[in-house]
Image: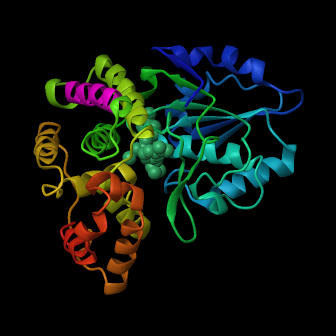
Amino acid sequence: MVDFVVYGRGSFDQLDEIITPHRKPSLPMVFLVDHFFANENGKWLTDRIPAKNNDRIIFANVTLEPKTSYVDKLAADLKAEFGSVSGIVGIGGGSTMDLAKAVSLMMNNEGSSADYQGWDLVKKPGVYKVGIPTLSGTGAEVSRTCVLTGPTKKLGMNSDFTPFDQIVLDPTLTSNAPHNQRFYTGMDCYIHCIESLEGTYLNEFSKSYGEKALELCRKVFVQKNEWDDECDDQLMMASYAGGMSIAYSQVGVAHAVSYGLSYLLGTKHGIGNCIVMNHLEDYYPAAVKEFKQMVEKNQIEIPVGLCANLSEEQFDTMINVSIGMKPLWENALGKDWEKIITRSKLRALFEKF
Ligand code: NAD
Ligand code: ZN
């Protein structure tokens, strides 16, 4: 779990005070910032980053979701220039936060980040790392994974060393995100809750957090008619609680299938989950009904026709990636999941997108 959590509107301005005790003589603090904030529009945030001396602000290119090759390059460049760093502060959406976690780990672990895609393969703790979300929903701020696309798979570096040492949850940082993006990332949280609460791995810990997160998602996307400050506050806490819920359970069908889509087509996590959830009546009937109501109420158009012209080989790739997510299927469908979810069933599902 994350050791230190600060929450509150404007809490971003405590960052200097928070990181100062973790500065090491002559080693820089690295601020890995979502490239969305690289231009004039982002100055309201970047001007408040407490960079000093040889600190470095690096804008993370998150046009594509994080790749192991990008993580390796960022870590190798920092090692070549400084030897080591005092810490990595990731400021951005789930992609930037995952990059920050992965780069922190790769500062102290040998080889390529691709070697550590899996469960409990990371050998040593990373450098001090801080996560500061500018989008709410992924739960990347609390999770023990950082999802990476590698040469052969899309899978996180899941380990006890992966969670941030500190997070700063300041809902004002999410306030001017585009409506669609806010919905897609917010639905990631909603789907985490459904998959956790309806999964076989559920226990009282994950249930307590999942129920609270689901309640907050409903306040934001079902009950509210217009976006306001309270929505930012509530969705940030929903993301945190949703992340805590899956930390002690697992995600399920929507994620397993959406990983296949994103591996082959590069479909982004939030939107991919929405595309899949739209067709999961057989697995989560009540939630899919509610999901469709939220899509309509929030006037979102879910893309269609993604798989219209794919080859046999491409369908096979998606099915392989998806069916490889064993813990997700087991959580969703129980120990006998392989008897329930067949390749032909998955193929029929992919054909709907
Ligand atoms: P994202 O980080 O991919 O960002 C989406 C877009 O929004 C980007 O173009 C980004 O530049 C922009 N953006 C970020 N903050 C903004 C702001 N305040 N205003 C306007 N634009 C902003 O989106 P996401 O949905 O937060 O994260 C998805 C990523 O998180 C995927 O890579 C996924 O694999 C990962 N993820 C990780 C976990 C985990 O537990 N580690 C869980 C779920 C998802
Ligand atoms: Zn997710």
Can you tell which quarter of the image residue 72 is in?
bottom right
Where residue 328 appears, x then y in whole percent? Answer: 37, 55
Task: Work out whether residue 133 or residue 299 is closer to the camera in this orientation and state it.
Answer: 133
Q: Can you tell which quarter of the image residue 209 is in?
A: top left
Residue at 50 percent across and 33 percent down: it is 142
In reply to whether residue 218 is colored magenta, the answer given is yes
122 versus 319 height, above or below: above
- Residue 275 in sight here: no
Direction from residue 353 to residue 62 in the image, left or right: right
The colour mode here is rainbow
| Range of residues picked out in magenta | 207-220
What percent of the width, then of the height, locates residue 89? 64, 33
Query: Magenta region's main secondary structure?
Result: helix
Q: In which quarter of the image is ligand 1?
A: top left
Q: In this view, does 196 lie to the left or right of 103?
A: left
Coordinates of residue 115 in the picture (x, y in percent): 66, 62
Q: Does the magenta stretch include residue 54?
A: no
Quadrant in which the N terminus appears: top right
Name the residue furthest front: 335
Q: Which of 353 and 260 is in front in this view?
A: 260
Q: Relative to the observer, which residue lies in front, 10 or 281?
A: 281
The image quarter containing residue 235 is top left
Locate residue 202 relative to residue 108 in the image: left or right: left
| Residue drawn 25% across the image and 70% down it | 339
